[in-house]
Image (cartoon, rainbow, N blue to C red):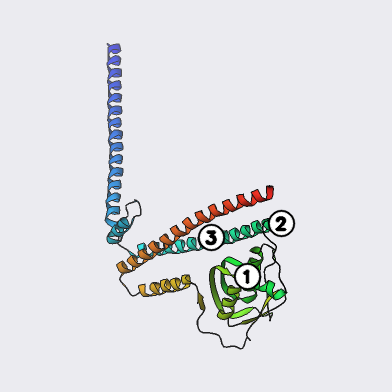
Amino acid sequence: MNKLLYTFTAILIVLIIFMFKGQSSNENLIETENEELSKEKSKNENTSHNHANGNVVQEESKDVRRIKVKNRDNPEHVLEDLMDEVVQLHDFKDQLNLMNDDLKNEIGEIKARITKRKIERGEIEVASYENEADKIKAKSKIIIPRFRFNGNNFNEMINQINDLSKRMDPYEEGLELSSSTNNSTMHNSYNFDFENMPVGELIRYVSIATTTRYEMTDKGFQFITPERSQKPETKDSVSSIDDVFEDEVVQDNYELEEEPIEKRIEKVEKNKTRINAVIKQLQMEQNNLNNQKNKLIKQAVRLNTN
C-alpha cells in the first residue's frame, strides 16, 4: 500500500513539473513575440517620423531635395548642406584648373624639347641673330601656354615668367626679367590669368596692370617699379573672367540673407549646377590634354631613339 502511494506521489510531482515548464515556455515565447512586435512598432514609428520630416534615405536628386526642403522642420539645415557642397565643388574646380594649367605647360615644354631635338638632327635650321636686341625680340615671341598668378609679390611673379619662358624655349634660354628694386611687395594683389600668349605680350600686360614700365637689357627686360609712396588703388586689379564671376557669386551670397529660405536654396542650387557644369568641362579638357601629352611623349621617344 505504501509502495503504491509513493508511486502515485512521484507521478503527480512529475506532472506538476511538466506543467510548470510548459507554462514557463509559453510565457517566454509570448515575451519574445512581444519584444519583436515592440521592435517592429518602433521601426514603423521611426520610418513614419522620417517620412514626416523628409529624412528618408535615398538618392540626392533635385526632386528629392525639393521634397526634403518642403517637408523638413528646419530647411536651414538643407541650405547649410548645400552651401558646404558648393564650397567643396569650388575647391575641386580650383584643383582641376591647377592640374590642367600644369598639363598645358608640360605639353609646351615637351614641344620645345621636340623642337630642340629636331634642331640637333638638322631638321630645323638653327636660329641666328644679328645682335642681342634681335635675339630678345625673337625670344619675346615664345608662347606661354598658361600663366596664372594671384598675389602681391612682384619678384615672385617675374620669376615665374622667367621660368616659363625658359621651359618653352627650345634653346632653354628664355628671357631674363629683373626688377629695379629689392622691395618686391606691391600695394595691390593682382590676379593674372593668360593662355597661349607670347611672353612679350604677357610682360606688356603685367606692366600696364601693375603701373610699372620696363626697359630692354642685354638678356631680357628690367621692370622699373613705382615708388612705395604711390597712392594705392581702392580695389584689387581684376585680370580674369573667373574673378568677375567669383565677385558675382559673393554678391549673390550677401543678397541671400534678405530672401526667403526657399528662394535662397533655389539660388544655391543653381550655383551648384553651374559649378558642376564647369567641372565637367574641365574634366573633359583634362582627358584631351592627357591624350595630347601622351602622343607628344611618344613622338619625343621616337626622335631620341632614331
Q: Measuring from the top left, give residue 172's x and y in whole percent.
A: 69, 64
Q: Measuring from the top left, give residue 68's x and y in whole percent.
A: 30, 58
Locate residue 174: give its quadrant: bottom right
Mark 2 to mark 1 CA distance (whole Å): 26 Å
Q: Which residue is mark 2?
A: 120
Locate residue 141: give its quadrant: bottom right
Residue type, mark 2 in image: Glu
Residue 205 in the image: above or below residue 52: below
Q: Earlier in the sequence, mark 3 or mark 2?
A: 3
244 left or right of 100?
A: left
88 left or right of 257?
A: right
Q: Which mark is residue 100?
A: 3
Residue 122 in the image: above or below residue 34: below
Residue type, mark 1 in image: Ile
Q: Earlier in the sequence, mark 1 or mark 3?
A: 3
Mark 1 to mark 3 CA distance (whole Å): 18 Å
Q: Measuring from the top left, give residue 188's x and y in whole percent.
A: 56, 80
Crowd rating for badge 3 (residues with CA inside 10 Å; few <14, some 14–19, many 20+): many
Q: Which residue is mark 1?
A: 161
Q: Earlier in the sequence, mark 2 or mark 1?
A: 2
Residue 25 in the image: above or below residue 260: above
Q: Secondary structure at mark 3?
A: helix
The answer to whether mark 3 and mark 2 are in CB contact below 8 A is no
Residue nearer the viewer, 256 or 18: 256
Residue type, mark 3 in image: Asn
Q: Which mark is residue 143?
A: none
Q: Residue at x 50, y 81 (%)?
A: 235
The answer to whether mark 1 and mark 3 are in CB contact below 8 A is no
Residue nearer the viewer, 225 or 288: 288
Crowd rating for badge 1 (residues with CA inside 10 Å; few <14, some 14–19, many 20+): many
Which numbered mark, 2 or 1, is in the foreground of this view?
A: 2
How many marks can you see? 3
